[in-house]
Image (cartoon, rainbow, N blue to C red):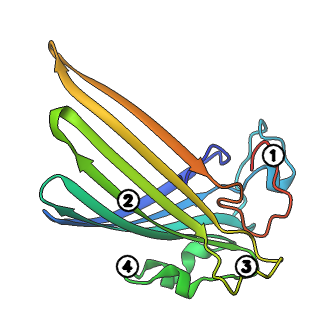
C-alpha cells in the first residue's frame, strides 16, 4: 500500500537479516519529485534536478514465524520530502523508531506503521492480511479541526496453488480499502484523479 504510479522513477536499496524464525528488512527508497507538484504534465519527460526537494522513504520490517505456517510482521516507515533526506545518518539506524525522530516537520514528513499476518493453510491455500495506520487521532486530538482525520488502509488476500500437469496453477483474490486521506499530509484539497 506504499507504492503508486505517481512517480516516474523509484530507486531502492534493501538490507535484510534472515534466520529460520526472524526476519528484519530495512528498505531505503528515493523517488523523483511528483510532476503535478511541479506544475508539469504527467506525460512530459522529466529529469531530476538534485538541487530541489524530492521524496525519500525508509521502511523497517520485523517478521517472526511460528509453527512453520504462521508469520506475524510489524512495520513502520517515513516519507520525507527534502533536498537531502537520505544524507541524514539517523535514517540508517536499524533500531530507530522513525516516528520519534521525524514527526510533524512542517508538513514535509508522513509517518506510518502497521501489522501483517500470513498463514499457509491445507490443500494449497494461503491467507495474508495487512493493516496500515497513517494517522491515528487520540481522543484529545479529535477536537482540533486543523488535524487530518484518522487514516488507515486494510488489505487481505487469499491464494490457491496446485500442480496441474507439468505446470503450477496459482489463483488469488485480493481486496484493499483505504480511507480518503491515506498518505496525505497537510493537503486540504487533494487532486481527485491522482490523490
Residue 60 seen anywhere in this rendered image of the structure: no
Q: Are marks 4 and 3 in contact (CB under 8 Å)?
A: no
Q: Residue at x 40, y 41 (%)?
A: 157
CA gap, disc 4 to disc 2?
A: 19 Å
Residue 134: % across, % down: 59, 67
Tell me residue 173's x, y (percent): 42, 33
For the residues labelled 1 and 2, say whether their Cβ atoms are less than 8 Å apart.
Answer: no
**Residue 75, visible in the rendered structure:** yes
Say which label, 4 or 3, has the lower sequence index: 4
Badge number at residue 142:
3
Q: Nearer the viewer, mark 2 or mark 3?
A: 3
List the residue tagged with mark 4: 94
| Up-down relation of residue 8 to residue 125 (above or below) | below
Residue position for label 2: 116
Name the residue beneath numbered marker 1. Answer: 192
Marks 1 and 3, how far apart in space? 25 Å
Q: Tell whether 158 sits left or right of 39.
A: left
Q: Earlier in the sequence, mark 4 or mark 1?
A: 4
Q: Is residue 169 above or below residue 150?
A: above
Amino acid at each position: 500500500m506504499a507504492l503508486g504510479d505517481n512517480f516516474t522513477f523509484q530507486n531502492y536499496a534493501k538490507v535484510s537479516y534472515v534466520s529460520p524464525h526472524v526476519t528484519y528488512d530495512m528498505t531505503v527508497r528515493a523517488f523523483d519529485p511528483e510532476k503535478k507538484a511541479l506544475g508539469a504534465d504527467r506525460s512530459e519527460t522529466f529529469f531530476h534536478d538534485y538541487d530541489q526537494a524530492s521524496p525519500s522513504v525508509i521502511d523497517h520490517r520485523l517478521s517472526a514465524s511460528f509453527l512453520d505456517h504462521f508469520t506475524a510482521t510489524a512495520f513502520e516507515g517515513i516519507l520525507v520530502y527534502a533536498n537531502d533526506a537520505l544524507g541524514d545518518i539517523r535514517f540508517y539506524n536499524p533500531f530507530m523508531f522513525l516516528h520519534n525522530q521525524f514527526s510533524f516537520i512542517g508538513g514535509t514528513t508522513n509517518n506510518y506503521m502497521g501489522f501483517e499476518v500470513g498463514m499457509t493453510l491445507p490443500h494449497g491455500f494461503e491467507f495474508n492480511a495487512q493493516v496500515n495506520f497513517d494517522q491515528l487521532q487520540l481522543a484529545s486530538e479529535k477536537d482540533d479541526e486543523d488535524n487530518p482525520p484518522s487514516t488507515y488502509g486494510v488489505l487481505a488476500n487469499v491464494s490457491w496453488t496446485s500442480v496441474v500437469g507439468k505446470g503450477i496453477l496459482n489463483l488469488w483474490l485480493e481486496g484493499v480499502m483505504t480511507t480518503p486521506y491515506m498518505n496525505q499530509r497537510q493537503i486540504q484539497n487533494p487532486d481527485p484523479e491522482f490523490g
